[in-house]
Image (cartoon, grey):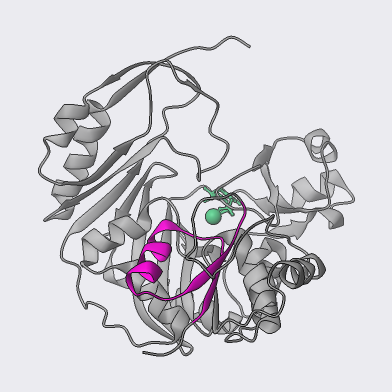
């Protein structure tokens, strides 16, 4: 075996399990303390800075003189730190510009527009000098979101020119609203080539993902071609990508691409739908190793992300019934009676999840509907 020495920035459970399983030594840079490292390795808890200068300073301070063969980003905010750190610690190098373009929605969209990738109209909020003109160009509502974010955090729908003037930050992108179902394409990339793809249907945005999606062959082809053009335009050499698209009546529109494994327990659903460990595959891609991917899915899987909303938990019903279902593969509910929940800040916030698998797409849909009916979390309103 090669002498790997890995620095993980923004660790994820599945990746850490896989590194430990393979006995690959690793150090960590994490935002909050989540994982331990072995003796002789270093775990640093510090913000994942978004400026290259601050990232460099952090690496100099935290890992002085350390050498790593590979730096792996597990989360969205780790993508740029990883691209920068690779240069400092002597690791396998990626393109730093690609890292910025995958992190910043405005740079990403400006760049990909040059490659003819279809997407909804957008502009920088710093260019929005005349509010009436913005609404004339983008229609209503105007979508405003942080250039660097994930999980739908801080997304606003602006309905009037007055809304636009308020809260202008200079760190946002403005977009024309797209009213269409969404899907994502997960890709494993090795030496500049896509080795495996999965398409996910956002059956209920933020709550239920179907893996794999069931699509007309033509649409599937168009989606995969779009995915390939984006990955190639960005010059992504290796790793895992998660591309989001809007499926409009006039064809797919590019939403965004992330250079990291997806959230929403899509990784868990992939493992049950395709019968392989996507974390092992992700690690293989990062290390430049070959990986044997399956050719066909073996089941129709789904992840159900549980978040009941804001309030005090009064009752949890139907858990036993759900657990009795044949198709349940994973079930975790992190809720206590009496617990107070705030409104969901982003899609990364959940109070549990279910992953299930069925033999057919029809059975999957039926199981999803039964779970939705059976599992009831009752809330009492909380004053204030
Ligand atoms: N222009 C838009 N039109 C309609 N919905 C949007 C638009 N932009 C974002 N959204 C909704 O918000 C979600 C999150 O936005 P996205 O651009 O994916 O940012 P992130 O996931 O990084 O927060 C999307 O999946 C979509 O549901
Ligand atoms: Mg997104």
Q: Going by the image, does 49 lie left or right of 256?
A: right
Q: Which image quarter is the N terminus in?
A: bottom left
Q: Can I make out residue 224 in this image?
A: no
Q: Quadrant of residue 70?
A: bottom right
Q: Which image quarter is the C terminus in?
A: top right
Q: Going by the image, does 286 lie left or right of 129?
A: left
Image vertical order of residue 299 relative to residue 343, above or below:
below
**Percent position of residue 6, x then y:** 52, 76
In the foreground, 130 or 192: 192
Q: Going by the image, does 133 lie left or right of 214?
A: right
**Percent position of residue 30, x then y:** 59, 57
Query: Does the magenta portion include 199?
Result: no
**Percent position of residue 61, x then y:** 76, 68
**Percent position of residue 33, x then y:** 56, 50
Magenta span covers which residues?
5-31
Furthest residue toward front: 39
Q: Can I make out residue 330 in this image?
A: yes
| Residue that appears at 72% across and 70% down | 59
| Residue that appears at 65% across and 65% down | 103
Picture quarter with ligand 2: bottom right
């Amino acid at each position: 075996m090669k002498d790997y020495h890995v620095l993980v920035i923004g660790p994820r459970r599945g990746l850490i399990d896989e590194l430990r399983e393979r006995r690959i030594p690793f150090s960590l840079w994490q935002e909050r303390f989540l994982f331990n490292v072995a003796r002789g390795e270093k775990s640093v808890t510090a913000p994942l800075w978004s400026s290259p200068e601050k990232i460099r300073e952090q690496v100099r301070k935290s890992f002085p003189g350390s050498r790593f063969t590979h730096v792996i980003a597990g989360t969205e905010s780790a993508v740029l730190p990883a691209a920068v750190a690779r240069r400092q610690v002597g690791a396998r190098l990626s393109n730093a510009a690609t890292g910025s373009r995958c992190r910043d929605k405005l740079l990403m969209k400006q760049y990909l527009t040059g490659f003819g990738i279809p997407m909804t109209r957008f502009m920088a909020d710093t260019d929005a000098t005349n509010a009436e003109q913005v609404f004339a160009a983008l229609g209503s509502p105007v979508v405003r979101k942080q250039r660097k974010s994930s999980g739908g955090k801080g997304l606003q729908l602006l309905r009037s020119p007055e809304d636009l003037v308020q809260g202008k930050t200079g760190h946002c992108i403005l977009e024309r609203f797209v009213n269409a179902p969404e899907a994502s394409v997960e890709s494993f990339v090795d030496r500049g080539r896509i080795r495996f793809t999965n398409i996910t249907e956002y059956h209920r945005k933020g709550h239920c993902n179907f893996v794999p999606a069931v699509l007309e062959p033509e649409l599937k082809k168009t989606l995969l071609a779009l995915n390939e053009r984006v990955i190639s335009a960005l010059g992504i050499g290796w790793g895992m990508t998660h591309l989001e698209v809007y499926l409009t009546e006039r064809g797919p529109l590019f939403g965004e691409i992330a250079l990291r494994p997806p959230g929403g327990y899509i990784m868990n659903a992939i493992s049950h739908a395709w019968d392989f460990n996507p974390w092992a595959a992700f690690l293989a891609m990062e290390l430049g190793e070959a990986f044997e991917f399956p050719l066909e899915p073996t089941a129709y899987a789904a992840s159900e992300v549980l978040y009941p909303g804001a309030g005090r938990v009064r009752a949890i019903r139907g858990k036993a019934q759900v657990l009795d279902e044949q198709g349940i593969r994973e079930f975790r509910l992190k809720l206590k009676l009496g617990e107070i929940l705030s409104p969901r800040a982003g899609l990364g916030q959940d109070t549990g999840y279910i992953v299930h698998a069925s033999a057919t797409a029809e059975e999957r849909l039926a199981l999803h509907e039964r779970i939705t009916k059976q599992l009831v979390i009752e809330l009492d309103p909380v004053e204030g």
